[in-house]
Structures are given as C-alpha cells and as structure tokens.
Amino acid sequence: MAYADRNVSGSRVVAIVLVAVIVAGMGYAFVTGLAYQYIKKQAEKLNTFDVQEPPPPPEEIPPPPPPPDTPVPPPPTQIAVPPSLVQVPTPSPQIATTPNIQLPPPPMQPPTPPAPVAPPRPPAPPAVAKKLTPRGSPQSWVTDDDYPASALRAEQAGTVRFRLDVDASGKVTNCTVTGSSGVSVLDTTACSLLKRRARFNPAEDASGNKIPAPYNGSFTWKIPS
C-alpha cells in the first residue's frame, strides 16, 4: 500500500507539472498573440495619419532672349481718317412778294425866296451948326468927395473914358464907358454921377433947330493926398 501511494503521488506531480507547462505555454502564446495584434493595430493607425510633405514648387525657367539679329518690327502707324462731310442742302431763299404800292409824289419845293432887300440907310445926322457945350465946369460933375470908399481903402485909381448921349433939351440920356479904368466900381460910379449932374446947351443945326448930339470926355480918379 505504501508503494502504491508513492506511485500515485509521483504521477500527480508529473501531471501537475505538465499541466503547468501547458498552461504556461498557452498563456505565453495568448499573451504573445494579443501583443502582436495590438502592435499591428497601432501601426496601422500610425500609417493612416502619416502626413506626407508637399513636393517643392517647380523652378521658373526664364524665357530665352531673342536672337540679336532679329529686327524689331516698328509699331503700327495709325492713320487718322477725316470724317466724311455731309452736305446739307441749303434752302433756297424765298422772295417775299410785296404788293405794288404807289408812292406819293414828292412834295413840291417852295420857290426860293428873293434875297432880302437891304434896309435903307438911316438918314445922315443933320449938320451941326452949333456944337454941344456943357453948362458950368465939367470938373464939378465928379469930385474927390465922390471917391468910392472901397476903392479908396484898396488904394485903387484910374482914368475913365466915357460918351454921353444928350437929347435936344441938353439932358443926358445914356452914359457908355469907352475906356475902363480897370476898376469896375470907379467906372460905374463915374457914369452914375455924370448922368445926374452933367447939363449941356444943346446943339443946333443950320436952321437953328436944337438937335441931339454926343459928348465924349474922360475923368481921372486920384487918391486924395
């Protein structure tokens, strides 16, 4: 019985070892297969997301230069063509017809008036048989007391030449200055005094009739000393 027990225990040990070896091999194979599949899958994933670099751009090749002997054609010349002139027909002028109007005859020119007849000459003054003479002294007609104050203050003096028209009664009717003294106030004062103060004996003709006559004289204004 003891021998049999030893054989049985030895067989068990061998069986356990074999089972352990088989389990270890199967585990190794299992583990090794799983690891290979995992690594293969990861490798496929990496191959799927692999980024390829783009190819470099092609280099630009410059165009070849033109041959030196090739002549360059001249630029095309543009010829300006003048626009065509369109002749517009000009309308013919219309001549307005006017009715025949009879113009009135020109007015009759009046006859040329005769040349004016020269007026008859005035009768010659009668011949003076007796001359006109003053009454009294002519020096009394105008004196130094009659000197205009304005001319005296301005120390103005001069000689006045005059003509008196005397009627048939010997009265002075008009005084005319024939030569001015150069001072108007002296001229007007002298004529005014002569018309008022001068008196004459009238002139007479050959028949003894009193006639008008002129009288010419002069008076000198002097500043009294």
Image (cartoon, rainbow, N blue to C red):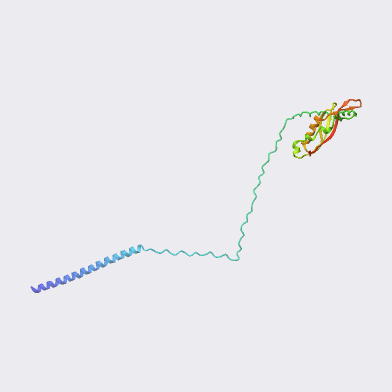
User: Where residue 139 appears, x then y in whole percent?
Assistant: 83, 34
Q: Quadrant of residue 135?
A: top right
In the image: residue 153, left or right of residue 79: right
User: Where residue 37 appears, x then y in whole percent?
Assistant: 29, 65
Q: 161 or 124, which lies in front?
A: 161
Q: 29 or 128, which lies in front?
A: 128
Q: Quadrant of the C terminus?
A: top right
Q: 61 or 99, which lies in front?
A: 99
- Considering every residue shown, the one lying at the far left of the view is 1
In the image: residue 94, left or right of residue 65: right
In the image, residue 43 above or below residue 116: below
Q: Residue at position x 83%, y 31% from top?
A: 164
Q: Quadrant of the N terminus?
A: bottom left
- Considering every residue shown, the one lying at the far front of the view is 225
- Considering every residue shown, the one lying at the far right of the view is 206
User: Where residue 3 appears, x then y in whole percent?
Assistant: 9, 74
Q: Quadrant of residue 101?
A: top right
Q: Is residue 24 visible?
A: yes
Q: Residue at position x 12%, y 72% from top?
A: 9
- Considering every residue shown, the one lying at the far bottom of the view is 3
In the image, residue 85 above or below residue 98: below
User: Where residue 87 appears, x then y in whole percent?
Assistant: 67, 44
Q: 73 or 190, which lies in front?
A: 190
Q: Residue at position x 34%, y 64% from top?
A: 46
In the image: residue 121, left or right of residue 186: right
Q: Is residue 188 visible?
A: no
